[in-house]
Each structure stands twice: as structure tokens, then as C-alpha cells.
Amino acid sequence: MNTRYYEFFCPVKVIAGQAALEHIPFELSSRAASRPMIITDKGVRGAGLLEPVISACEESDQEIVAIYDDVPPDSSTDVVRAIAAIYRQEKCDSIIAIGGGSAIDTAKAVNILVSEGGDDIAAYAGAGVLKRPLKPFFVLPTTAGTGSEVTSVAVIADTRKQVKLPYSSPFLLPDVAVIDPRMTLTLPPHITAATAMDAMTHATEAFTCLQKNPLSDAYAAAAVRKISDNLLKVMDNPKDSEGRLELAQASTMAGIAFSNSMVGLVHSLGHSVGALCHLPHGVCMSLLLPYVLEFNLERIREPLGELLLHLAGPDVYALTPKAQRAEESIATIRKLRDELHKRCNLPRTLKETGKVEESQLDRIAEMALDDGSIMFNPREVSLADARAVLQNAWG
Amino acid sequence: MLARRIKPVALQARKIYVKLMMEVVGRSLQAISDLDPSIREETRVLPDGFLFEMTVMPHGPALVMQKLPKGRLRYCGEKGPEAADLSIRFKHIAHAFRVLSFQEKTSEAFAYDRMLVDGDIGYALRMTRVLNRLEAFILPKLLAERAVKEYPGNLGLSEKLLQAARIYLQVASQFLATVKLA
Ligand SMILES: [Fe+2]
């Protein structure tokens, strides 16, 4: 699998590590921003994650002009419009998104409206509609998983028309991604595991699907290593601030990898399971990953075998004959899932979720064929193939 | 413009080849959608009248297909009656040439960002599967395996139709030889 051509783009300034939050005032001022608005959700506020951000700013005489803390898990065009109205009323000049995928996507869409004007966010849907930079935009991820802080896409539901609006533009990329261990320290075990497995899937798919390239490979491999080395440690000791930081960085690195080497069938199937059975995205990723790798195996033997070094470490890699490394990589991922199941009941099969009916598998397979990510899967996927993978993942 | 002075014949020939192949693809799609139920299975869900366009930036060549009832496709030539509902645009004639001369798979061309999709991504995936199946039909097996990710095992089309399509293709591939010489 030689990539004959590739594109790689990531203009996001990453500020990461101890006391990273305290760099926010300087980064704002260096972009001539003085009136930031925070966009977040109730969970983040409830977990007390706003206080360290606000106090880091206030200590530096940086006022936070407005806070919107009511982004729902499935954000909508109405929410985006409401937030944009507050932004304008308070004469804000920049956005700080704090949260997971929904808060970050919402903030991206708000940034379109407040930069381009108007109230009709649907008018900007699609690829490449935006032609110029938006307002200064900072992102503080609070789940180490989605990688949204380094991606150029957002999805917003139009609840009235019952459609999901996709947005894709390099101008949606944040100016700054802030990775501070304080932001993920209180993440509950179940979410820590699921979101880390989402990041693991981003990295694994970026490393094995059609857009793989030398730059995305470097980020993907390093992300797999950090997750393999730290996930169980953090599960056993949730206050391990260093381990938390490693997972958060891994998530960002996996995000950089997959935004430059698109994910494949795990995501096509996972998006459908998530939408039809209302399961969290990370849970779908974790349970589908080994079954899709098995399906793709003969096409990805070489890169998947290479990943063993990062999944299991140099000793296991050296002791495993080259011809068996790909299988061993899948086995290592299965072992990790077993350990996570022991610690927080993270489901390993569709049946274990308790939320999927076997009768739904046909519909899930059909829907997966319409998911854009399927184009980048190394193996062509027919309806029967998709159905067969789901059957294997059933349990 | 400088390149044109240096290799005018080759560049001109490449453009004519792409134009010709667009027509081959368009006419074959129309013929095969009449005969192949698997292709109609993919196209049936498109709204009737739906216009699909494959074009080269900035000024073509192009091919436009219109969806008729029961999943049939009609070749409209270079221009449709209205703006297309779904458009797949090659960024450069060189990229279209690579795909249409079977040096690069359609899925690779997507992966390499050679094309832009404007419209519903689910529909775009369907049309890509239709194009893959078409390539499997009209190309000799060896060439087709290079052009699509997986060569389908169940083609089962009448030899007659295949011959018809291959005649178009022969014209095109003779031309391709000329281009490569140029
Ligand atoms: Fe994901």
C-alpha cells in the first residue's frame, strides 16, 4: 500500500501540559482578542472545569465576557443561532469551546455565523463554502477522544428538517488547542475508556486505510503507543495526572492523524449503530474495532503488523514472527478490551450493550453503506460484507 | 501556457482522450443500467430526474447522467438540462486522465484528494459503486482489477452487451496508445 500522493494540513497551535490553561490570556492577546465567549455544557460546568479556566484568565486581567453552558449532547441549528445572538449582544470577539464533540462542533458553527453574519447556518453547509478566516477560536477538550480540536469538520442537526448538516472547511480548524491535564482528571472511568478507544480507533484506521501517508502515520503510531501505555494505568488510578495528559495528547495526535488520513469501516458501521441504537460513539468504536480489522486483514497485514510494536511494545513485537504480527495486533486490542470490560463493563459485542436488537443489523448495514468513511476503507464493502461483520460483532 | 508550446500534441491528445472516455462511460452507463439489476439496486433510491455530473475543473470535459424511473440512467451528454444535484469534479485534467486511463482507481483518486464532491455523500458513494461495477463490465479483467478495489464475482451479463461496450473502449484504448506515444 504505497501512497502515491497525499495532503497533510494542521495549522492548529497546540499548547499542552502543566499550567497550559494559564497560557490562554497571552494567546488571546496575541490574536488581538479581548472579549472571549465560553461555549460549553452543563456537565463541564457541573464537574467544576470552568473555574480553573476562568481564574487563569482573571488572574491575568482577562475578562470572560459571556458563558453559554447549555449545549445539548446533540446540538442543533437552533442552539447555534441562540448562542450567536448572545455573542453579538455581548460584543464578543473570540470563542473558547470547552467540552467534548458536541460543544466543539457547536462552537465551530457559531463561529461561522458570528464571522460571516446572518442567522442561516444551513446556508454554509457542505464542503469548502467558507472562503476566509473566522474569529479567533480556542478549544479545550474535556474528553480524551474525539480529536475535534484538530479537525476541520462539524455536524449540526437541523431539528426542524430532520437532517444532519455537515460542515467542512479548513477555516473551521481552531487557532489554539489547549491540552491541560486538569481538564480530563475527573472524567468517569466508563467515559475515559470509551473515548480513549475512540482515539485508538482513529489512529488504527488512519494507519491502515487508503489515505495513510508518512506524516499521518507518525502521529497515528505515536498515539497508539501512548494509549496502549497509559489507558489501563489511568483506569486503575484515575488521579494519575501524567497518564491523563498522555491520553489527552494521544487523542489530539490521533485527531491530527485521521483528519489527514480518513477513517474507514469501523466508523461507517459505528456511526450507524450510534444513530440507530443511541449508543455513545466511543463504545461503538471499541466493540467494532477488532471485527473490522479481521475483515480487512489481508489488505492491511503489513501496516497492522507494524502497529504491534506500538500496541504491545518491543519485546512482544520482536518475539512475534513477522507473518503473525497482524493477528497479534488484533489479539492485543482484544486483550485491552477484556481488561476494560473487567474494569468498567465496556461492551465487547453488540449483544453486551443491551441496546441493540439482532433484527436491527440489516438496517445498520444498509445505513453504513451511505457513510462517507466507507470510501476510505481498504477493502470494498458490499451490503453482505457489512452485515457479516455486524454478525461477527453481535456476540 | 508555456507547457502548451512545449508539448502541444500530448496535452491536446490527453484532453481529447478524457472527452472520449467520458462519452464511453456515459453511454455504457446508460446501456448497463438497462440490463444490470445490481446497478439499478444502487440507483433506485436516487430521486427521479436526479442529475449526476462528472466533470474536470475548470471548464470540462464533463458527462451528465439523469436518473429515470426504476433506477435507469440516461446519458445527457456534456451538459444537463439543469444544474447537477451531485457533482464529482476532478481538480485537473491530469487527474481525470489517470483515472480514465485506469492508472488510478476511483477510490484512490478520492483518497488522494484528486476530486471534489458537491452534493449528498451517500449518493456520491452509490455512484462510485456504480462506476466501479461499470469498469468491471467493460474492461478486460486484468485492467479492471487495477481500476477497482475488488473485482466482483457475479457479473453475469450477456456477452453481447459486453462486446458492445468493449468496442467503445477499444476505440478509446487505441487512442490511449496514441496519447502515450505523443
Ligand atoms: Fe471516532
Image (cartoon, rainbow, N blue to C red):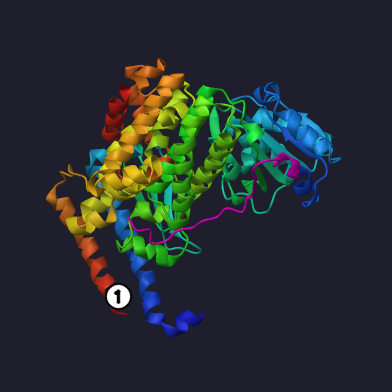
Describe residue B151's horizontal placement relative to residue A261 as left or right.
left
Main SS class of the magenta portion in the image:
loop
Q: Is residue A11 magenta?
A: yes
Tell me residue B22's x, y (percent): 35, 60
For the point 43% across and 41% down, the residue is A372
On the image, the x and y values in percent for residue A177 come to: 64, 44
Q: Is residue A238 above or below residue A151?
A: above
Q: Residue furthest left?
A: B159
User: Dividing the image into 4 quarters, which one contains the N terminus of chain A?
Assistant: bottom left
Figure quadrant of residue A178? top right
In the image, which residues are magenta?
A1-23
Name the residue furthest top: A354
Residue sitting nearer the eye, A114 or A339: A339
Report the residue marked by disc 1: B180
Residue that protrudes farthest toward the front in the picture: A315
Magenta span contains residue B66? no
